[in-house]
Amino acid sequence: MVKLNPSMRLAVNRDTFFLPNPDGSVYFRNNVGTFRMEGEMIDQWVQQLLPIFNGEHTLAEITADLPEAYQSQIYQIAESLLQNGFVQDVSDCKPHQLSAAVVERFSAQIGFVEQLAGSGGQAFQAYRQQKPLAVGAGSFLLALIHALWESGCPHVHFALTDRSSVNRERLAELYAHARQKDPEAELTEIPIQQQGKAGWEQALAPFSAVLYVADDAEQSELPLVHAVCREMGKTFVPAFGLLQKGVAGPLVHPSSPVCLDSVLRRLHRVYLREDARGHPFTATSAALLANVAVFEWFKQVTGVAAAEPGGKLYVLDLETLSGSWRTVMAHPLVQGSPRLVPVDEQQVLAEAEPQRHGLFASFQAWTSPDIGIFHLWDEGELVQLPLAQCQVQAVDPVADGPAELLPARICPGYTHEEARKEAGLLGTEMYVSRLVGACGIRTASAHMFGGGKPDSTQESVYGIGAGESGAEALCRALYNCLQSSLAEQVQLRPPVATRVKLPELRDEPCLFYLRAFAIEKEQPQIARGADLCGFPVYWVGIGNGTEWVGTVGLHEVAALRKALQAALLKRQGAADEVLASVVRTSFVSLDQPEQPEQEAMLRPCPDSEAELWQQARDVLARQRLVPVLLNAAVEPFLQEDLAGVVALSLREEEAHG
């Protein structure tokens, strides 16, 4: 609640619009929102008061000698307007020494700062005292210099990255035009005395801010100048063309978590060149991006940007000249490889499901075709019967930039929610696995040795698991570790299994999958493989045994579900390269095929992930195996949106005595 005092001097914001309604109420609107004010004769009160709220009179002066009822009405209207952001108190504005001509010429800039940050005159005075360095060449540099003058920054220095591409005559015309509007306008060229880092360090030393423009970021010194600015603590604002898009931002100051390297690593290469025809980088594109870059710097200097999130990026379509804002997260590999620290099992299990918002909302927020962690995460045009399907494609965080994409994967599910969740978690694990690999840690895309048990003489292999709960993350990490071992075994020798017949099933998903096979007139062959580290392995053959899919499970029913699900998805026509988390082979050696089929021992699945993990721990203990855990939540969004992301490997228990 806003508390008024008589010394306040209220001024109506420049974006305020009001309209009296026939019913006597008044409708207010500005760039932020709307509201309606009601009351007896309120339209007449508003029409009389708003011209008086010009910042020149205090509330005490306005209400002097008025009846108490009138004073109360004025204070109520003022309080409502102030609380809703349609007027502001200018009584505490700091003084400035701007001339009347400057105030008149740049009244829009001063008013903008006044409304959003206060003390607009003083902030704009500080802005005019800045001496930025504009770096670039050609028409892009001319557009940048012109934008600086138009914004109210008179003292412009520039450095050329290509001396032959600048139209000196046009530059002189722009300077003469700027001097007519602002006699304080200055233009000084800063020569680059030598090539490379040393030359730029010398050129940038006198300046607190560098604005760099380039038609083609990949053929410029943009990364070098950015690195020098970071080392020297300079504010850096880039605007550049990158493949078939234009980019302005981010504004990088000494304490910025997001820098240009993060932007280049986050932007998807396929998005930047999605139009095969290509479009030239025009002078109009350059002018748009230059103005955006200057405006971002203007907001930072005047204090307007203090309330805005960091890492803002403006991306321009060079064909339509339409643009949009993006917010980029800092990339974990910019400052070197992240460090994975050991984590206690009980600590992981204690992590509850995040309450901030739902898992699907998080996956959706991570998905973007231009800068997302997921390039896509949706059903697309996938057939949804008999199995629900969802596809996911994560970016490769290890690429230097622009970001390449990891292979797309299709995840089936008994329900649409199950398929979407599985796809989101799998995409997360693929993304994190690449980051963990960049830290020098082998992930479960490799293998384990020694008949399904990890060989202590070999480097540890870690499975990555992400989950809505800590227990789910542990279960998935163990599953991925075991599944990788199964894949390695199949590469070394054909799998051996025993055909089994299923007892009367009570597991609804398994029953559904078998009914779907029956409808397709397919009789799948079901075989039980040798246990892997004490965990069950199931194989399902289709096409008269010409194609087999297999999976390990932390529980008998879970393994059977996965195998039936994968076989059914294969039957639906999914290509091998997009099938997720299953092992495929064309041959399974059936042990004693002439013997009657054995009956599978299927106990009910545990009710919770925590119970399933505890059963898995008991199995590992009987096999004398111990899980080794690392915290793989190497980025803030993983810590905020998921209960756990862990890397798990298995080692043999040390003998005692």
Image (spheres, rainbow, N blue to C red):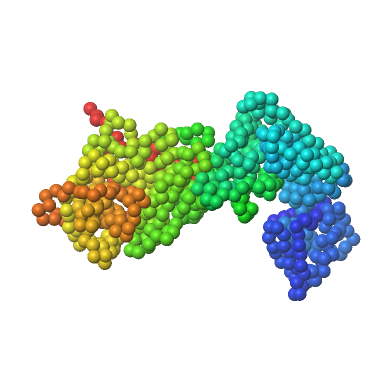
Q: Nearer the viewer, residue 388 or 65?
A: 388
**Observer able to see residue 204:** yes
Q: Residue at x 37, y 63 (%)?
A: 384
The single residue placed furthest to the left in the displayed view is 594
Q: Residue at x 83, y 48 (%)?
A: 105
**Observer able to see residue 350:** no
Q: Is residue 255 left or right of residue 513?
A: right
Quick check: 227 above or below 183?
Answer: above
Residue 142 rendering spot, x and y as whole percentages = 73, 41
Q: Nearer the viewer, residue 21 or 590?
A: 590
Residue 310 rendering spot, x and y as whole percentages = 61, 44
Residue 396 rendering spot, x and y as whole percentages = 45, 43
Q: Residue at x 79, y 48 (%)?
A: 110
Quick check: 435 above or below 319?
Answer: above
Quick check: 468 above or below 230?
Answer: below
Residue 491 rendering spot, x and y as whole percentages = 26, 41
Quadrant in which the C terminus is drawn: top left
Q: Residue at x 50, y 37 (%)?
A: 400
Q: Is residue 362 left or right of residue 8?
A: left
Instruction: Give the total of numbered labels.
Output: 0
Q: Nearer the viewer, residue 594 or 578?
A: 578
